[in-house]
Amino acid sequence: MTTLRVGGATVEFDEAKGWAWTYLHERPRTSAYPAYDGYPGSADDLVGAQDLLAVVLLNVSNNPIPVYYGLESLTPSINERLQDPAMVGELVDADSATLEAIVRLFGVLEATPAKYVRLTTLSKVLHRKRPNLIPLFDDNIGYCYSECEGAPVSFEDGRSRADYRLKWLKAVQDDLASQLTYWEEIAALASGPKITPLRALDIIGWELGNRRN
C-alpha cells in the first residue's frame, strides 16, 4: 500500500483518490469544483477585480463585502509583486529566489493590513493566477503542516510570519516533489477544468485536516 503525506498527516493513496473523486465528481452544484477552478476571472496573469470574487467559491469568508474591498486595496501591491522576475515556474522545482518572491508576495498582508484579509483569503486569489506555483492555505492545511503529530513546521513564539511562510513553502515543495506522480494521478481525475498537482495536494490536505480526530 502507498501512503500519501501532507505535512505530518498521512492517508493511503487509494483512499485519497476516493476523497478526490467524491470532491471532483460526486457533489454536483455543492462542491467548490468546478466553480472555483473554472471561474473565468481576469484574462491575464495579474489580479483584476473579477478575480477577487473567486474567494467566495471556496467558502473562505462570511464577510464578502469588506473582503472584496480589502483585496481591492491590496491589488496594486499584489500585482507589483506578481511581476517580480522570480515569480515564474512551478513550486515543485522552485529555487530560493522564487520561494522568497512568494513570501514577499504574501507580505502584502502586513505591509498594508486589510480587515478580514488573511493568508487563507489571499492564497485563494493568488493560486488561480499561478496554479502551479502558489499553494492554497487554510486552517486544515495549517493543521497538516503545523499542528498534527509529526508536523514539519511548528508554530514558534517569536517566529516572523515571513519565516513561517518560507518554511511552510519548503515543506509543501518537498511533499509535492517527492510524491509528484501521485498528485498528478489525482489531478487527472478532474473531468472539467484542469487542476494542477498543487491543487490536488490541497484537496487531500483539506480532507485530512477536516477529518482530524
Image (cartoon, rainbow, N blue to C red):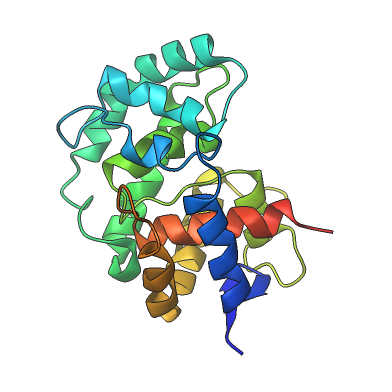
Q: Nearer the viewer, residue 9 or 33?
A: 33
Q: Nearer the viewer, residue 84 or 143?
A: 143
Where is residue 75? Give x, y as percent. 31, 22
Residue 104 figure quarter: top left
Position of residue 181 relative to residue 122, above or below, is: below
Give me the residue at 32% from left, 38% from top: 38
Would residue 135 be found to the left or right of residue 139 on screen? left
Residue 177 visible somewhere in the drawing: no
Q: Quadrant of the C terminus?
A: bottom right
Outermost residue to the bottom: 1
Residue 212 visible somewhere in the drawing: yes
Would residue 66 be found to the left or right of residue 1 on screen? left
Where is residue 163? Give x, y as percent. 52, 53
Give me the residue at 32% from left, 55% from top: 133
Where is residue 102? Give x, y as percent. 35, 48
Position of residue 125 relative to residue 178, above or below, is: above
Q: Quadrant of the N terminus?
A: bottom right
